């Protein structure tokens, strides 16, 4: 047995992320690791990679006790990560990237110089092993996404790893490139390297894996031979739970009247997207990473420039959408990265909540009615169930992810939005805070607002939406109405569409 | 067809500094035939030496996405102290050594404040800018120091017919080029400039790199200051004022990015330095109104930086759309 993880627990503060997970990996085996966002996949892998120390549990590597305390230690032991975000420097050459952590050296006039000749030879040798057919002198920024990924793997292979963890390796690859990657992975397996493969693309996992492990809410649902799974069964294992308990009821039917109409909107990676949202409707938008969902929302909100198409808001055409106009119209956009785009991270909770609604508390003389503002901010913070010690002095950086997200939401609820666009609102948020956010969304709809909910979690969409659109490769691929919601059909639409697209080209 | 147009534009924007250089030479050449003489070209090189050395140091800092505003003050302080020493009868080599030590110390101070206190380089070096200038004014009683003849040999001396400042410039640029292209330290500078977090993950000690670049910048400031006072023969209370901006402008004209990780000393920064010096020299040759100099420098900077910004925006957009 190459790797054995036994009874792994991990608790962050009060939140338990992993509750006694077991994992086994044989030499040359490929273990597919699947589960929803927040199921604990990355925590488990970060424990293996030495980033976190488990609260409880043990690991053995080749039957020896293995307890890394730093990523470097894990790396030395032969555990290598291929992250979704590659650790490459586009401003340096292929050769320089390969040896950035340790160049071959020579002495010249007392200076310690890079031994260009031997570095180049070694680089060529490494590149030929993985079949990456580029010059070692070329800048990495000029390589395609697939070539960059191969380069990252090359870098890893030069350290002779025992286990390689792939985290969503195919999201930026075309189908053809992905197939080539799979061939390489197979070769690595045949050399005895154990592979852990994490992906939301379940078809890939089904076809690649020897064994599959399903994680859900920090528990291992099961680890079994790949033959024991079928795609629908796998999906059910991933998301199968009593949805009603997590998703509060909402007895609101959408009105016939439309509030937003989008037609033929397009730019670089978004193509001819048309749809409309009714008043009091929750419209879901599903798609794999890179499907163009966030890009579409950014176009709509005027964060990126729309190249074609028209947008109507309550029957009126919006010329050149901009966040400023939308806020005036009562349309809010909760972006995907709350830390970078949603919050002034060092400022107080109150300052953050005030931001969007401030114009409504401004007198004709441009002074602010602070008494009204302060009391409304506090009321909103309480309604959102933000857990804080001091609203006015505590910076949002000190809050947990869930409470940060509730703060962003509070900021937007201060303008009582008629349409709220939510982009991955529950990413990296624990179950309790999710439930609170879902309730807030429902309350808003009851008051007459509409929601556009972008999410990678089918379960969340099914639990909340009246209608779900599925996007793939920048286009809308399919539409599902509430009566016809079906997890596997939705997932398949997202996957399958991609499949068709590549067959056609 | 669109493709051809596109790559043509690309070529123009990639070589904007060289094109400007050619335009400047052609223009001044037409207006004043003496401008094109060999002697004048040589003069430009001699005049460019001090700025070239400063800008080389500045390039190291800019490559890490930092900035050093204290360069002019280091020059001034080093000039004042060494000038006083020499006037008081200290030997030249001793004064030179003190100058270099002052430069190194300021570099150390800048780097330490930046990574120990985690204050952005702009603020830190703005503070040390005032420290250097203030100390210099205090020590010199805000009076100009006239240097003895012996000091001037550094500025006007020749070896094998080549002026010493040019030899120094050549030496500094060669060494800097070697460090940036052929050493681990150089490659790590580019890595840190692109993304310090990634660099840390790749096992690079970011603090050590920062210390290195600010010390190099301080050293170059002191050395460049030495060359400049040796050419001028005096240290006035305004000596070195705005030199940091000239150095930054030269590096940026040479294609060094303010966002870090892109650019080089040779040919990049050297071309930027020569362009600035050529324009200044040319304006003198055609008897332009001296008040126009800063405006023309400004126009050139706007042009080149504008083009760089456009390129950067395109790159950013391509990155966001392509690699996501």
Image: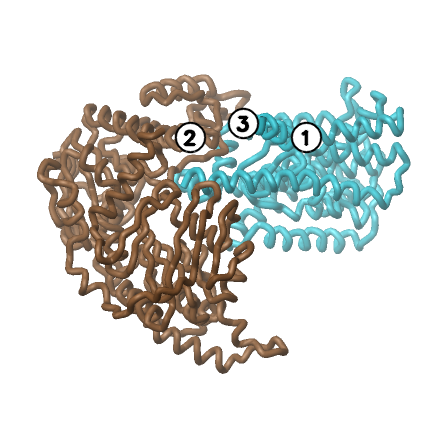
Q: Which mark is residue A364?
A: none
The quadrant of the image that shows the C terminus of chain A is top left
- Same chain for mark 1 and mark 3? The answer is yes
Task: Give the distance between the C-alpha atoms of the residues marked 2 and 3, in whole angstroms.
Answer: 25 Å
Q: Is B292 rendered above or below residue B56?
A: below
Q: Disc 3 marks which residue?
A: B181
In the rendered image, the residue lying farthest to the right is B287
Task: Give the distance between the C-alpha atoms of the residues marked 2 and 1, in whole angstroms.
Answer: 32 Å
Chain A palette colour: brown
Label 3 lies in what chain? B
Q: Disc 2 marks which residue?
A: A144
Snapshot quadrant of residue A289: top left
Count neighbours of disc 1 (C-alpha within 10 A) and say few if under 14, some if 14 to 19, many if 20 or more.
many
Task: Give the distance between the C-alpha atoms of the residues marked 1 and 3, in whole angstroms.
Answer: 15 Å
- Same chain for mark 2 and mark 1? The answer is no
Q: Which mark is residue B270?
A: 1
Contact, mark 1 vs mark 3 (Cβ under 8 Å): no
Q: In the image, what residue occupies the spot 58% across and 48% down?
A: B110
The residue closer to the viewer here, A433 or B293, is: A433
Residue B283 location (% of width, % of height)? 85, 36
Q: In the image, what residue occupies the spot 86% across and 26% down?
A: B30
Task: Point out the tag, 1 or 3, that comes first from the N-terminus.
Answer: 3
Q: Is B72 rendered above or below residue A77?
A: below
Residue A379 location (% of width, % of height)? 39, 78
Snapshot quadrant of residue B162: top right
Chain in cyan, by letter, is B
């Amino acid at each position: 047995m190459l790797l054995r993880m036994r009874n792994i627990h991990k608790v962050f503060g009060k939140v338990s992320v992993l509750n006694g997970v077991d994992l086994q990996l044989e030499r040359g085996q490929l273990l597919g690791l699947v589960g929803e966002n927040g199921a604990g996949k990355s925590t488990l892998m970060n424990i293996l990679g030495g980033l976190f120390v488990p609260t409880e549990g043990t690991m053995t590597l080749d039957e020896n006790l293995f307890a890394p305390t730093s990523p470097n230690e894990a790396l030395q032991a032969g555990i290598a990560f291929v992250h979704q975000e590659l650790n490459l420097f586009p401003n340096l050459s292929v050769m320089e990237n390969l040896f950035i952590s340790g160049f071959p050296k020579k002495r010249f006039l007392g200076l310690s110089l890079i031994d260009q000749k031997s570095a180049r030879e070694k680089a060529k040798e490494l590149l030929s092993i993985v079949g990456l057919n580029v010059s070692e002198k070329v800048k990495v920024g000029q390589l395609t996404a697939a070539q960059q990924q191969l380069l990252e793997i090359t870098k890893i292979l030069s350290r002779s790893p025992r286990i390689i963890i792939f985290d969503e390796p195919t999201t930026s690859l075309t189908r053809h490139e992905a197939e080539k990657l799979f061939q390489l992975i197979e070769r690595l397996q045949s050399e005895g390297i154990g592979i852990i493969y994490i992906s939301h693309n379940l078809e890939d996992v089904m076809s690649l894996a020897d064994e599959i492990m399903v994680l859900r809410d920090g528990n291992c649902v099961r680890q079994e031979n790949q033959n024991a799974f079928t795609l629908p069964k796998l999906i059910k294992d991933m998301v199968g739970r009593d949805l009603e308990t997590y998703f509060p009821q909402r007895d609101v039917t959408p009105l016939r009247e439309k509030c937003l109409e989008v037609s033929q909107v397009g730019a670089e990676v978004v193509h001819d997207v048309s749809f409309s949202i009714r008043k009091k409707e929750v419209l879901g938008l599903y798609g794999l990473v890179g499907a163009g969902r966030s890009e579409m929302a950014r176009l709509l909100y005027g964060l990126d420039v729309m190249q074609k198409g028209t947008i109507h808001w309550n029957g009126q055409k919006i010329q050149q959408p901009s966040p400023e106009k939308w806020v005036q119209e009562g349309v809010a956009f909760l972006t995907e990265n709350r830390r970078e785009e949603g919050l002034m991270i060092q400022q107080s909770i109150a300052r953050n909540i005030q931001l969007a609604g401030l114009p409504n508390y401004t007198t004709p003389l441009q002074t602010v009615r602070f008494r009204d503002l302060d009391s409304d901010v506090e009321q909103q913070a309480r309604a959102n169930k933000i857990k804080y010690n001091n609203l006015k002095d505590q910076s949002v950086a000190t809050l947990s992810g869930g409470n940060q997200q509730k703060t962003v939401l509070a900021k937007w609820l201060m303008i009582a939005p008629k349409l709220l666009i939510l982009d991955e609102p529950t990413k990296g948020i624990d179950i309790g805070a999710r439930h609170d956010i879902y309730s807030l969304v429902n309350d808003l709809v009851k008051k007459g607002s509409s929601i556009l909910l972008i999410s990678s979690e089918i379960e969340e969409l099914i639990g909340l939406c009246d209608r779900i659109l599925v996007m793939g490769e920048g286009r809308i691929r399919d539409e599902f109405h509430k009566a016809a919601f079906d997890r596997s059909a939705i997932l398949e639409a997202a996957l399958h569409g991609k499949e068709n697209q590549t067959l056609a080209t | 067809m669109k493709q051809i147009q596109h790559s043509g534009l690309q070529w123009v924007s990639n070589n904007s500094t060289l094109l400007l250089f050619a335009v400047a030479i052609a223009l001044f050449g037409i207006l004043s035939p003496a401008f094109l003489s060999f002697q004048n070209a040589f003069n430009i090189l001699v005049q460019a030496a001090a700025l070239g050395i400063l800008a080389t140091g500045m390039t190291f800092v800019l490559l890490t996405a930092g900035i050093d505003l204290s360069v002019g003050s280091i020059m001034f302080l080093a000039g004042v102290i060494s000038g006083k020493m020499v006037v008081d009868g200290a030997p030249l080599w001793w004064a030179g050594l003190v100058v270099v030590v002052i430069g190194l110390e300021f570099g150390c101070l800048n780097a330490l404040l930046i990574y120990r206190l985690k204050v952005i380089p702009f603020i830190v070096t703005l503070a040390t800018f005032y420290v250097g200038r203030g100390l210099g004014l205090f020590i010199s009683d805000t009076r100009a120091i006239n240097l003895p003849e012996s000091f001037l040999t550094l500025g006007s001396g020749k070896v094998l017919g080549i002026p010493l400042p040019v030899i120094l410039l050549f030496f500094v640029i060669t060494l800097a080029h070697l460090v940036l292209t052929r050493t681990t330290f150089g490659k790590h500078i580019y890595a840190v400039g692109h993304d310090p977090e990634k660099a840390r993950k790749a096992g690079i000690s970011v603090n050590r790199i920062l210390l290195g670049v600010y010390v190099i910048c301080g050293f170059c400031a002191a050395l460049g200051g030495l060359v400049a006072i040796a050419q001028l023969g005096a240290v006035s209370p305004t000596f070195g004022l705005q030199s940091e901006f000239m150095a930054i402008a030269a590096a940026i004209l040479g294609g060094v990015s303010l966002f870090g990780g892109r650019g080089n000393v040779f040919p990049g920064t050297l071309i930027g330095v020569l362009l600035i010096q050529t324009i200044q020299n040319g304006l003198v040759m055609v008897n332009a109104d001296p008040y126009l100099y800063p405006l023309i420098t400004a126009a050139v900077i706007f042009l080149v930086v504008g083009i760089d910004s456009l390129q950067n925006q395109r790159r950013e957009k391509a990155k966001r759309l392509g690699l996501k």
